[in-house]
Amino acid sequence: MALIAILPGDGIGPEVTAEAVRVLDALSLDLTFEEALVGGAAYHATGHPLPAETLDLAKRADAILFGAVGDPSCDALERSLRPEQAILGLRKELALFANLRPAKLFPGLEDASALKPEVAAAIDMVIVRELNGDVYFGEKGFRTNAAGNREGYDVMSYDEAEVLRIAHVGFRTAQKRGGKLCSVDKANVLETSQLWRDVVIEVSALYPDVALTHMYVDNAAMQLVRNPGQFDVIVTGNLFGDILSDQASMCAGSIGMLPSASLDANGKGLYEPIHGSAPDIAGQGKANPCATILSAAMLLRHSLGLDAAADRIEAAVGKALTDGARTADLGGSLSTRAMGDAVLAALEGLK
Ligand code: NAI
Ligand code: MG
């Protein structure tokens, strides 16, 4: 029996997580669920966004399903108490260094993409983003500089071991897909990127079956819009990956459609939609639950080896969309619950 930690979070997190749990339940797998508070919900109840009980559950569990955090009522708090610290803390504490973000256009969503339908239809890629290093985790602070001006700074750095392990994930992901890996950096300007590129090239010797290319991040941003079909797997650092994966999501229809996995070295993982807590629509029952439902499918596949069940969830989401089910972000009017119902009905129909 596998233990799944359910961490709904705040904002739309609880709304979308509830639908994903309903879908997991409907599969009658040998799973137990244990829920804990995280983010703004945890701060308001306990004074901390990542309470010790929550971290303990996350460590005990075989896998974690996470909603979203980002309660704006916590905006004035010092940084260490903000909801977003919970997700950063979980990534660090559980050594979740590899973030896999598939982006593909489901049939029928061509019109929801920001791109021309024929360009969008070709999108089927995975962005592998490093999660534990880069500018988010470097030395940071405020100071008054020599000119007497206030200055903020965040140091970007990568250690070769950090680049090495994410490069391996990138190459292995490409091996299982189309055999193409594009490493994205800014090696024309940044020393961090020069090291990144050197290490990726060294690792490539072990994967002669993968075609490696390099692209500067500004060009990658352009190519994602111009011709996204050229990409199979992209491997990149934390900052560039954060931005490019959100961009890829708009190309693929909606941020409400895209799941993610954050894995440690042993395949344990935290699974979450790539979107945040969407305070602008929280509590209104309007959020698209598909990204979280598809995250649950990734959980079954990557942490529990339940590939057939994962395939069924993905097929059910595809069928619900083909049958016309749409939340507001996809140009429809279904509520979060009704979209969950549509996926459950499709799952029933696929039995
Ligand atoms: P966001 O992803 O929460 O929202 C961006 C836009 O997309 C909003 O207009 C929102 O309504 C829409 N949207 C997002 N998810 C949707 C869904 N499932 N269905 C329909 N529409 C959806 O990003 P934003 O506004 O930049 O951040 C809000 C808060 O979330 C911030 O506090 C941010 O720090 C936090 N955040 C948390 C993340 C996490 O929990 N891992 C990731 C990204 C942001
Ligand atoms: Mg982001």
Image: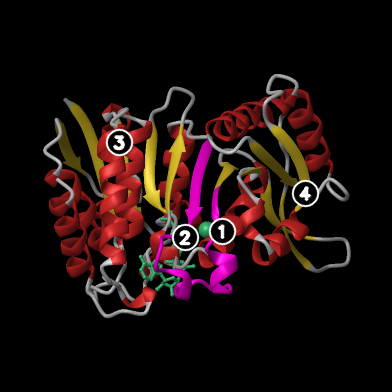
Residue at image point 37% right, 79% down: 331
Residue at image point 72% right, 56% down: 220
The kind of residue tagged 3 is Leu
The kind of residue tagged 2 is Leu
Per the rendering, the mark at residue 105 is 2
The relative height of residue 53 versus residue 204 in the rendered view (above or below) is: below
Q: Residues within 10 Å of mark 3 (few under 14, many from 20)?
A: many
**Residue beneath disc 4:** 215
Report whether residue 199 is seen. yes
Residue at image point 58% right, 72% down: 115
Quadrant location of the N terminus?
top left
Per the rendering, the mark at residue 122 is 1
Rendered location of residue 200, percent (x, y): 74, 31
The answer to whether the residue labelled 1 contacts the one labelled 4, judged by CB atoms less than 8 Å apart, is no
Viewer-side label of 1, 2: 1
Tag 2's secondary structure?
loop
The relative height of residue 303 versus residue 284 in the rendered view (above or below) is: above
Q: Magenta residues, as a range?
A: 98-125
Viewer-side label of 4, 2: 2
Horizontal side, residue 66 vs residue 113: left or right: left
Rendered location of residue 198, percent (x, y): 81, 31
Q: CA distance from mark 1 to mark 2?
A: 8 Å
Quick check: is the Cβ at mark 2 less than 8 Å away from ligand 1?
no
Q: CA distance from mark 1 to mark 3?
A: 26 Å
Viewer-side label of 2, 3: 2
**Residue beneath disc 3:** 300
Quick check: is the Cβ at mark 3 less than 8 Å away from ligand 1?
no
Q: Residue placed farthest to the top in the image?
A: 206
